[in-house]
Amino acid sequence: MFEHDDDISNDVTARIAASLKSPVRLDPAFDARVMARVAALPAHRPAGPLDRTWSWLRRPRSFAVSPLAGLAAAAGVAAIVFFAARAPAPRTSEAAVALDRTPVEFLLVAPRASSVMLVGDFNDWTRSATPLRTIAAGGLWSVTVPLAPGRYRYAFVVDGKRWEPDPSAPPAPDDEFGSPASVVTVGGGL
Amino acid sequence: MGIGDGMSEDADLVRRVLAGDAAAYGGLVAHYRDRLARYAMRMLGDRGDAEEAVQDAFLRAYRSLPRCDDPHRFGPWLFGILVNRCRTAYARRARRERVVVHDEPASLAAAVSPAAERLEWEAEIAWALERLDPLYREAFLLRHVEDLTYDEMAALTGAGVSALKMRVMRACDRLRALLEETDRV
């Protein structure tokens, strides 16, 4: 069930989770209390003809189609695709997407750090995905990431456990994360 | 799916309840009670509040049962109601009073027997869990205790997968840091 992409591989996290998985028993009379309250509520009524019709209309279903009708439908779709392909249309290719990305350099001064990682919306907050490297004496760490236009939240993880926002960037709103992160906006010439 | 084992039995019970057999709801209560109780207890940290949240979730689910689009998905649907009830309960309690947080883990005193060690460890985890931001606690519990996938968590909480991954990661870091304060890890 675990996706093994985060901290469950850590022994401490696994021990915490195992402890928290121990069962919690409610008062033995709990079921009776709930059912007494349920009994005091109006019972659901069996669906009438109108309900059944509405339910039938909403239900997803599959259709069986004869081979001839299927061929006709396929020909119609092919014709639409053919004419659509002839019309001039903007094309997006991987190269175009790559061209659309802007290299963004992330910098952090951390003289005593032994490692710095960049985590953010662009790498799914995966701690190991984007390490920074020292580029100058005095503990200047750097990494450059190509980013498509948009707004991204990010933070640095120093020495594997200490989260730090980017002191040179605006803070991310607390309502989303509740602790320090930063925001970078990459323009797209819009 | 982490929630909803026995989905065909659930679907049968849901159909019976919707057909007017209120007693059939007892089967659903019995099936999900313990799972919901565990989440509510870990989330709220108080047995009375947890029991009230679980009861409230069951009653709301009963009243809203016609809106459960897929009877096979009753479990996840019910769990989503509980997650919201816990959020409401936590917010209400925070307004009513400051959450009681122990200054220190309950049991830093010497404990020697394995049972006492276990109780001490559980008390320290409860203490650390209570100090987590509620959004982090919620994400941690759904991911690592209820074993949901991030997509399932996103469906339940309305938050994005990326934000949820971040909350879980920070919850893990914070829990480790808090427990390190107690010299247990």
Image: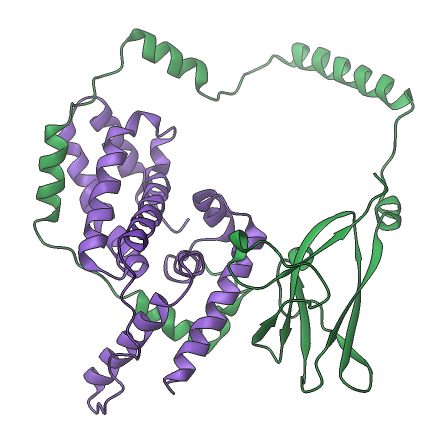
Chain colours: A green, B purple
Q: Residue at x 71, y 68 (%)?
A: A130
Q: Nearer the viewer, residue A85 or A31?
A: A31
Q: Is residue B171 found left or right of B123 in the rendered image?
A: right
Q: Residue at x 29, y 62 (%)?
A: B99
Between residue A113 and residue A29, name the one nearer to us. Answer: A113
Question: Eyeballing the image, is A157 above or below A30?
Answer: below
Compared with B26, B178 (above or below) is: below
Give the number of marks. 0
Q: Nearer the viewer, residue B88 or B120?
A: B88
Q: Is residue A162 above or below residue B6?
A: below
Rendering coords of residue A162 (x, y %): 57, 76
Q: Position of residue A127 (x, y in %)?
A: 62, 69
Residue for point 72% across, 73% down: A131
Q: Name the quarter where the C terminus of chain B is drawn.
A: bottom left
Of residues A132 and A64, which is closer to you in this image?
A132
Rendering quarter of residue A68: top right
- Residue, x 16% and y 33% (percent of image)? B24
- Please say if A174 is above or below A150: below
Residue B107 position by quadrant: bottom left
Find residue B40 and report its horizontal and vertical position in percent: 28, 54
Drawn side of residue B75 relative to residue A184, left or right: left
Can you tell which quarter of the image residue B26 is in? top left
For this view, does A53 lie left or right of residue A93? left
Where's residue B80, x and y in %? 37, 43
